[in-house]
Amino acid sequence: MTRLLVILIAVYVIYYLIKSSLKSKKLNSIKAENTSQSRTQKKYQEEKEGEFDSYQKEIAYIIYSSTKDDDTCKVCLSLDGKYLLPDNRILNDIRPPNSGCKNTNGCRCKLMYVTKDEEGSEKIESFLKKHGGLCDKQALEKEVLNL
């Protein structure tokens, strides 16, 4: 009877060792897979950021445009016609879809990107740099465009 008990314990120990060995191999393969996926995701994100950075160098300024109808909220209307430099800190907070938008259908605003090769973009870009990278349409028209 004791021999049977010893054999059962030995079988159980061997079973437990094999099970834990397989479990650790499976965990290691999952970790390796996750690591390779996260590396791929990081690489993709870095490529995208680099791609945006190269385009950002060509952008002179950005114009915030809201849909001006009865459904447009006050937050979006207040931002309509604002001129911003592409490196302005506020841009990340107001980038459409604007998180502060009160429209029940969601934000419908757009950003219009103006490149440096557009006529008059140098004047507007330098004006924005003098005024902290943000101004409204009226101030710009009054000072730069002489309208």
Image: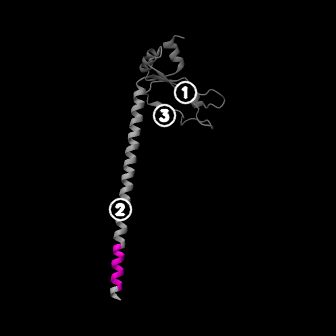
Amino acid at pointer 1: Leu
The dot on residue 79 is 1
Return the x and y of residue 105 as percentages of the image width and height. Answer: 62, 37
Residue 93 bears which disc, if any? 3
Q: Residues within 10 Å of mark 3 (few under 14, many from 20)?
A: few
Q: Mark number for residue 90?
A: none
The local secondary structure at tag 2 comes to helix
Q: Position of residue 25 (x, y in %)?
A: 35, 60
Which residues are drawn in magenta? 4-14
Where is residue 120? Give x, y as percent. Answer: 47, 14
Camera-nearest residue between 45 and 106: 45
Q: Which mark is residue 24?
A: 2
What amino acid is labelled 2 in the image? Ser
Q: Quadrant of residue 40?
A: top left
**Most prominent secondary structure in the magenta stretch?**
helix
Residue 13 on the magenta segment: yes
